[in-house]
Image (cartoon, rainbow, N blue to C red):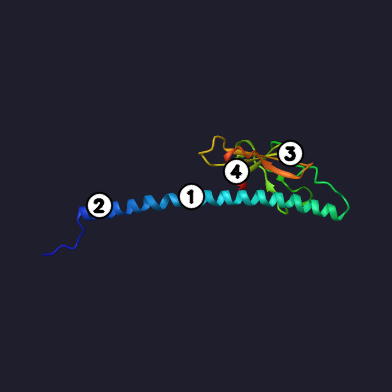
C-alpha cells in the first residue's frame, strides 16, 4: 500500500523557503508606500512654488510688481483649514492638520508665513520639515542644512 502524503520534513522545507522569500518581498511594500508619500510631498512643494510664480506672472500682466502677501487666510495651528488656497496658489488647497490629527506627510500652518510638513521617516532627528514663505522674494523654502529638507527639495 502506497501513501500519497507529504512528510513533515518536506512541509517544513517548503515553509522555510516561503519565509525566506517573504522576508525579501514584504519590506519592499513598506518602501513603496514611503516612496509614494515622499513623491506626493515633493509634488506638493513644487505645486506651491509654481503657484507662487504663476500668481506673480498674473500680477505682472495686471501691472503690479509684487508677490502675494500671504499664501492663504487659514487659521494658524488649526486642523481642517484650506492651505495655499489664497489668490489661486493651488487650485485644490491642501487641508491642514494639527494636534491629534497629525499624520504622515501632512501639512500644518505654524505661523502666518511658516508651514510644517510632517514626515514619517525615523532616521531623521525631527519628524517634520518647516517651510517659510518670504513675500518680499516670493520664495518657499526650508533649512537646507537639515537632511529632510534636502531630500524633499532635491
Question: In the rendering, which numbered label is found on residue 12?
Answer: 2
Question: In the rendering, which numbered label is found on residue 147?
Answer: none
Where residue 143 sits, quadrant-wise, is top right
Q: CA distance from mark 1 to mark 4?
A: 19 Å
Give the residue drawn at x 60%, y 51%: 40
Number of callouts? 4
* Helix, strand or loop for disc 2: helix
Q: CA distance from mark 1 to mark 3?
A: 32 Å
* Discs 1, 4 touching: Cβ within 8 Å: no
Q: CA distance from mark 2 to mark 4?
A: 47 Å
Of the numbered discs 1 and 3, the one sitting upstream in the chain is 1
Q: CA distance from mark 2 to mark 1?
A: 29 Å
* Helix, strand or loop for disc 1: helix
Q: CA distance from mark 3 to mark 4?
A: 20 Å
For label 4, count other residues whose C-alpha is less than 10 Å away and answer few (under 14), some (14-19) or many (20+). Answer: few
Give the residue drawn at x 77%, y 47%: 86
Amino acid at each position: 500500500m502506497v501513501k500519497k502524503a507529504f512528510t513533515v520534513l518536506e512541509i517544513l522545507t517548503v515553509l522555510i523557503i516561503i519565509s525566506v522569500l517573504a522576508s525579501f518581498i514584504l519590506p519592499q511594500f513598506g518602501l513603496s508606500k514611503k516612496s509614494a508619500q515622499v513623491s506626493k510631498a515633493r509634488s506638493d512643494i513644487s505645486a506651491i512654488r509654481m503657484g507662487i510664480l504663476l500668481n506673480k506672472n498674473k500680477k505682472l500682466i495686471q501691472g503690479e510688481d509684487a508677490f502675494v502677501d500671504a499664501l492663504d487666510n487659514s487659521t494658524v495651528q488649526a486642523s481642517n483649514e484650506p492651505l495655499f488656497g489664497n489668490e489661486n496658489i493651488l487650485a485644490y488647497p491642501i487641508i491642514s492638520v494639527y494636534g491629534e490629527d497629525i499624520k504622515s506627510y501632512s501639512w500644518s500652518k505654524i505661523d502666518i508665513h511658516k508651514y510644517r510638513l510632517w514626515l514619517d521617516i525615523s532616521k531623521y532627528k525631527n519628524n517634520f520639515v518647516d517651510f517659510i514663505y518670504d513675500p518680499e522674494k516670493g520664495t518657499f523654502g526650508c533649512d537646507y542644512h537639515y537632511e529632510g529638507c534636502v531630500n524633499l527639495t532635491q
